[in-house]
Image (cartoon, rainbow, N blue to C red):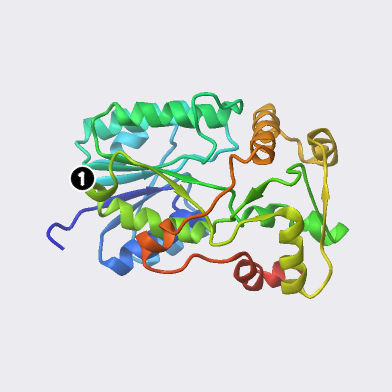
Amino acid sequence: MEKQIKVLITGATGKSGGAAIDELLKMGYPVRAFVHSKDERSEKLSAKGVEVVVGDLLNLDDISAAMKGIDTAYLCYPVLVPGVLQATAYFAQAAKENGLTGIVNMSQISARREAKSNAAQDHWVGEQILNRTGIPTVHLRPTFFDDWFLYTRDIIHENSAILLPFGTGRWAPVDSADLGRVVAKTATNIAAFAGQALKLYGPEEYNLFEMSEVISKTLGRTITYEPLTTEQFFKMNSKRGASDHFVQHVTHVAEDCINGVFAGTNDLIETITGRKPTSLAEFFTENKRLFA
């Protein structure tokens, strides 16, 4: 290692952020974790020797303070929460103020100028903001995560069915831990990836009918897929209090999925990390007890 660069990880208590931190520590790099509040998860990071700072991605002073003495930083703003453009603009300004030498930005595969989803279009605009800083930046554009099944596990358990508005759309589910390892590798080798938008996929592409067969075999019980309209989906989830932002985003990414925007696969995760990405069957095997 020619220079002991220090990396800032936002979203540090999430699965991708946590995996990025573990990989960075394994590689021998010092890490600073940016968390929203101190809790049991942040205490576990401290116990690993990670420097933990508390702040809000919608507060410029918090971000700038967290970047002091940092070389490269990972920006991960939750897609289902409004504010990604403000957070990205603040992140860009703070990175300039602190002389960062690289940025890894979590975007999404549907990010594009013509996206109908406000969140997807905002991610694309955010990419342009970061590019204009002149700081070498790599944008990660993953397809849907396999982890998203965890958010609907109660519905899967109660109905023995996957109830989603994605029709026969296809994608290769990507595991967020694999994504975290990509973050670690790119953050410590920015020169090799700067200026690129990397589309990241899991190893196998399916539609939800095919996924339900894999899940059934792994769990040892029959799980079917019942396609819903977006109206049916939100009515079913009305008690969860879906925000307007969530409804608008999911409505249009469902359309994108059906229209093939999320389809495809490649070997980028394995090429970058040196290990095969997690398959859907492996994900459900690992989390089998959560779907019992």
Quadrant of residue 244 within the rendered picture: top right
| Image location (x, y in percent) of residue 267 | 44, 59
List x then y, in percent, for residue 117. Answer: 61, 28
Q: Amino acid at mark 1?
A: Gly
* Vertical placement of residue 135 versus 30, above or below: above
Tell me where residue 112 appears, x and y as whole percent: 50, 30
The residue tagged with tag 1: helix, strand or loop? Answer: loop
Q: Is residue 76 left or right of residue 147?
A: left
Of residue 88 and residue 121, the one placed in the foreground of this image is: 121
Does the rendering let one see residue 46?
Answer: no
Q: Quick check: 94 left or right of 226?
A: left
Q: Is residue 277 visible?
A: yes
Task: Write the residue at 31% across / 45% down.
Answer: 73
**Residue located at (52% from left, 56% from top):** 176
Image point (67%, 28%), residue name: 248
Residues 203 and 111: in front is 203
Q: Please, is residue 242 above or below residue 286 in the view?
A: above
**In the rendered image, which residue does mark 1 sit on?**
69
Quadrant for the N terminus in the image: bottom left
- Name the residue at the bottom extreme: 220
